[in-house]
Image (cartoon, rainbow, N blue to C red):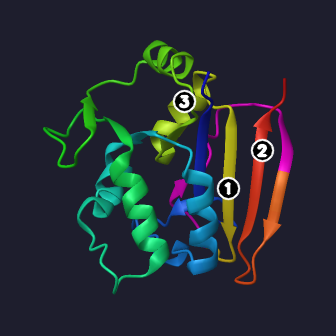
Amino acid sequence: MGRLVYSAITSLDGYVADEDGHFDWAEPDEVVHAFINDLERPIRTHLYGRRMYETMVYWETVPVGPDSPEVGRAFAKMWRAADKVVYSTTLAKVTSERTHLEHAFDPEAVRALKQGSPRDLSVGGAGLAAQAFEAGLVDVCRLFVVPALVGGGTRVLPGNVRRDLVLVDHRRFESGTVYLDYRLKA
């Protein structure tokens, strides 16, 4: 059975985007990006909300030639090879391969997807992740905390959910980014 993994880059004050929707402060350096690639490599199915999908679809067409950075090429190849499910009430169609559009988040369908998957799945986008947390579907929470305060915006974690977690791994990068890997406490 696959686990549902929520992985996000967040400011120190707990936001994935500032009040204007910007997240330029969150771009990982090559070392952090390579580490993220290693974590994402085993995942073959990504669940996205509309905004996260619209951000991530960049990887569908980004050049992957020898002149582009290796970490970007590696991530683009992984992303293109993975299945994607996009949950949106407003998106009319998807523009990437291996992508399925759902107009409503169905916790029972996601439970069945986890049950039938031999690999972990990821959930991307704070709004969709909040729904998955509320439904008790998230098994792993991986946060990359960057040394920035943005003062407000889109929260990385839902404010109305209580879950007990266990820290299973952590790492500090030279850039000041800190990786925290939590599992839900049994």
The CA span between labels 3 and 2 is 16 Å
Asked if residue 122 is positioned above or below residue 27 in the image, the reply reads: above
Which residue is denoted by mark 3 in the rendering? Answer: 132
The reply to whether residue 172 is visible in this rendering is yes
Tell me, yes or no, whether the two marked residues, 3 and 2, touch with CB atoms within 8 Å: no
Which residue is denoted by mark 2 in the rendering? Answer: 182
**Type of the residue with mark 1:** Leu
Please check the rendered image and state whether residue 91 is part of the magenta-colored stretch, yes or no.
Answer: no
Which element is circle 1 on? strand
The CA span between labels 2 and 1 is 8 Å
Tell me, yes or no, whether the two marked residues, 2 and 1, touch with CB atoms within 8 Å: yes
- The residue shown at (35%, 57%) is 56
Which residue is denoted by mark 1 in the rendering? Answer: 143
**Type of the residue with mark 3:** Ala
Q: Observer-nearest residue: 68 or 131?
A: 68
Which span of residues is magenta-colored?
150-168
The reply to whether residue 10 is visible in this rendering is no
Is 126 displayed left or right of 172 in the figure?
left
Name the spot of residue 158 as percent of width and height, x first: 61, 40
Provide the major secondary structure of the magenta segment. Answer: loop
